[in-house]
Amino acid sequence: MFSDTHFHFKMMTTERGVNGVEVLSTMAARNCFFGLDIGTHCDDLAERQSCVEQAIAGITDGKLAAKAREFMYFTAGFWPDVGAIHDRENQMKILRQSIEAASAGGDQDTLNRKIVAVGECGLDHHWNPSGEDGRCESDFDEATYRGEREMFESHLELARELKLPVIVHSRDSFEDSLDCIKNVGYDNGIIHCYSYGIDEARAFLDRGWYIAFGGAVTYNKKAKLEAIKDLLRFVPADRFLCETDAPYLAPVPLRGTTNTPVNVELVYKFIAEVRGTSLEELSNLVDENIKQLFSL
């Protein structure tokens, strides 16, 4: 139970000190169906896969180790930081090469090295100079703004060529994100860590996108809580996914701590209560959607 369609395993373990062996063992013991490790740099795929492989090798219970190998999958893509935007043509070439190398690897039976999605990729216009990404609006001159859109569209084009879904990062940039998607005309994937309202959700859903919710849905103060609940009830069952974005966005009551995929259960619990369903029903629903989206 409790699949997680978005987390960053290497960031969580090597950068934040989380015990990866323990996380994967717990997920395996819960019979997790699907865990998706997400790319953020054009050349990070091999290191991310190696990090997961090392953690699996540390699981002493052979059955749990085998389960971890079965449920772990990977994406490849890169996040829209300013450096990547201005080096986008070169970085797209490196990304393509890494996907081809992973898909051609000879160890398919020991780890799901074949990439199941492109991303995360997209647009981010959240200006927070003191935040982890240090983004300032002044960084985005016309060339950078246009370059960011072009980079996102290049990811969408690559995904269409490879016949893969896309993991879309869209923060404070709904209109531009939708415009890029319309320009390319490829509607296959997830709007990750969804942070807009019902009208925006309808626009994505009408085009066939899946909507993924994480720990942030548990943060809202009373003034916004009813709107969040309405949104969670609005998204159709066949387009609904749950995620953590670990090591970020730990759900209440763990907010402010380093997040892990184990904590996705708290997201499921919150959403199941809002949607008036059982944990098991919601988990099964998400797993069926994963099967459909990723052709598993």
Image (cartoon, rainbow, N blue to C red):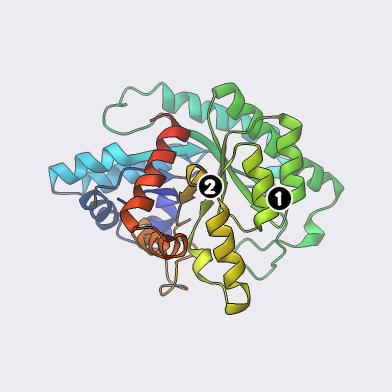
Q: Secondary structure at mark 1?
A: helix
In the image, is 230 to the left or to the right of 135?
left
In the image, is 26 to the left or to the right of 99?
left
Q: Earlier in the sequence, mark 2 or mark 1?
A: 1
Query: Label 2, on which residue?
Result: 236
Residue kind at label 1, given as amino acid type: Val
Q: Position of residue 44 (x, y in %)?
A: 49, 41
Residue kind at label 2, given as amino acid type: Pro
From this viewpoint, which residue is outermost toward the bottom? 222
Given residues 129 and 210, the one toward you in this image is: 210
Given residues 104 and 69, the one toward you in this image is: 69
Question: Which corner quadrant of the image does residue 101 belong to?
Answer: top left
Given residues 244 and 88, the one toward you in this image is: 244
In the image, is 49 to the left or to the right of 230?
left
Given residues 261 and 295, the one toward you in this image is: 295
Question: Which corner quadrant of the image does residue 135 belong to?
Answer: bottom right
Which label lies toward us, 2 or 1? 2
Q: Position of residue 202 (x, y in %)?
A: 66, 47
Crowding around mark 2 (Cα neighbors within 10 Å: few <14, some 14 to 19, many 20+) is: few
Q: Is residue 35 something that shows in the picture?
A: no
What residue is drawn where x is 49% and y is 62%? 248
Query: Label 1, on which residue?
Result: 82
Crowding around mark 1 (Cα neighbors within 10 Å: few <14, some 14 to 19, many 20+) is: some
Check the picture and name the quadrant holding the C terminus.
top left
Q: CA distance from mark 2 to mark 1?
A: 35 Å
Q: Position of residue 71 (x, y in %)?
A: 31, 40
Which mark identifies residue 70? none
